Image (cartoon, grey):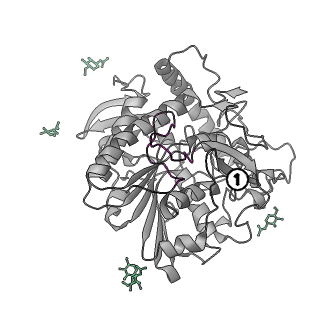
Amino acid sequence: MVKNMRFDWTPSSISKYNYVVVKIGVSVLIMGIVFHLFFSTSSGVDIIEVEQEEEITPFVEEEARTPSSSSRSQSSASVEVHEFGGQIVEKGKCDIFIGDWVPDHSGPIYTNKSCHILDDNPQNCMTNGRPDTGYLYWRWNPRDCQLPRFDAVRFLDFMKNKSWAFVGDSISRNHVDSLVCILSKVEEAVLVYHDLDYKNRRWRFPTYNFTLSALWSPFLIRSDIFIDPDGDASSEIQVHLDKLDENWKNQYQSFDYMVVNTGKWYFKTAIYYENNTITGCHYCPGKNLTDIGLDLAYRKSLQLVLNYLTSSNHKATILFRTATPDHFENGEWFSGGTCKRTMPFKEGEITFSNMDSMFRNIELEEFQKALKEGLKNEVNIKVLDMSQMTLLRPDGHPGPYTHFQPFAKDKNAKVQNDCLHWCLPGPIDSWNDLIMEMVVNS
Ligand SMILES: *[C@@H]1O[C@H](CO)[C@@H](O)[C@H](O)[C@H]1NC(C)=O
Ligand SMILES: *[C@@H]1O[C@H](CO)[C@@H](O)[C@H](O)[C@H]1NC(C)=O
Ligand SMILES: *[C@@H]1O[C@H](CO)[C@@H](O)[C@H](O)[C@H]1NC(C)=O
Ligand SMILES: *[C@@H]1O[C@H](CO)[C@@H](O)[C@H](O)[C@H]1NC(C)=O
Ligand SMILES: *[C@@H]1O[C@H](CO)[C@@H](O)[C@H](O)[C@H]1NC(C)=O
């Protein structure tokens, strides 16, 4: 049994709120140190961010570099209505998010050879030399129904003339990379747009007139992130709890489907604004500001995003993805935490950390409200509750294999581990099986 392995420096008796504060406090204290360590060991790569929680490593490189803005389905295997614990409300439907990983000999749909997006990709565990391959041979098996594998031909046929967007943080990027790799088995994706640091990208699948976009929006709402040329955070992130991130808002009209997520970035030290006035902060000792609580800030911003989507005149299909847990053990991302497991957990062998559970509950509660609003306004919104299925896959992360052969020169080299993002190919490919089921097969 592994419980709460993430935050084990805090006594479990601490109440949720204190616990959050303690946790963040510790993170922030350590953050500065790590940041320098990190930069002294990662020669001049253009990475640029104080990464609390998820984004310290070169592979994550999630920064905004300047202050900038930054239907009902009928299938037996689909669920849109969830209760807080992931329980199904709709009778007779299978909850595809509850189940187990079972051995599967067929292996991944694509490999490091077939997908060019994996060249130089920090999630390319195969090429980077991850020695074990067992993590490739599992299939997500919902408890009460069969989940077919992603059928790329069928998907592309279905999506003729359509446009998709994945909006969110670096896990969203990880996810879209997986989808591009899967679809590229049928037709090579043509990258028709990218920004300087490839945070925003757009592909076309010409035969199908299908457009797929990846949009960078780690908070989904407006956030100004200040990074100086050394890559240090020169100031706290300014988060506007009453303004959407225009990076996606301005393009929203052009999307038929949008997959959105957020999560980890909310752990970072932040000053909150409403109506352009400071209204509070998250972890800001010495600033004479009110720490309004991460839960409140998170709920507010989700409400803003979901309200916009469900009341918009533009009616896209929205897939709202829950945050996914990391699997650092024996330390955190900044203190030598690793993820060396080579097997999935079984259901019940692991539970969410308090923080993950708090975030997920807020997400599911706010989704419930959005679902009702969406029904009124005929906006099709569904939840992708990936939290539980990914919690069970501690074996699916790159760990030290985020760059080529990290131990080639020195078997005992000290390497930053990535126990947050997912190997490609890897467990995250199954997320697309679920999307296929919810969007195409239903
Ligand atoms: C793919 O990974 C294998 C190891 O799993 C490696 O031998 C091979 O060189 C890699 N191919 C490419 C194109 O990176
Ligand atoms: C591609 O799809 C767009 C959006 O639906 C449509 O306006 C356009 O005519 C399509 N182009 C072709 C060549 O089918
Ligand atoms: C795609 O758009 C083109 C051009 O507008 C149209 O001729 C074609 O029928 C559309 N295909 C589908 C499947 O909607
Ligand atoms: C926002 O601030 C402006 C002045 O900066 C003020 O006139 C307005 O009433 C404020 N609105 C709200 C909702 O607080
Ligand atoms: C903190 O802010 C309050 C209200 O804005 C103010 O009355 C108080 O003097 C401030 N305290 C310090 C130490 O600046």
The quarter of the image holding the N terminus is top right
Whether residue 365 is visible, yes or no, is yes
Image quadrant assignment for residue 380: bottom left
Q: Which residue occupies the foreground of this view, 104 or 120?
A: 104
Q: Residues within 10 Å of mark 1 (few under 14, many from 20)?
A: many
Q: Which residue occupies the foreground of this view, 129 or 389?
A: 389
- Residue at (85% x, 54% y) in the render: 408
Q: Which x, y percent locates residue 60?
A: 59, 51
Secondary element at tag 1: strand
Whether residue 195 is visible, yes or no, is no
- Residue at (51% x, 33% y) in the render: 85
Count of numbered circles on the image: 1
Q: Which x, y percent locates residue 421?
A: 63, 49
Q: Which x, y percent locates residue 76?
A: 52, 54
**Can you say whether 198 is above or below 388 in the image?**
below
**Can you say whether 400 is above or below 252 in the image?**
above
Look at the image and give the residue range highlighted in magenta. Answer: 76-97
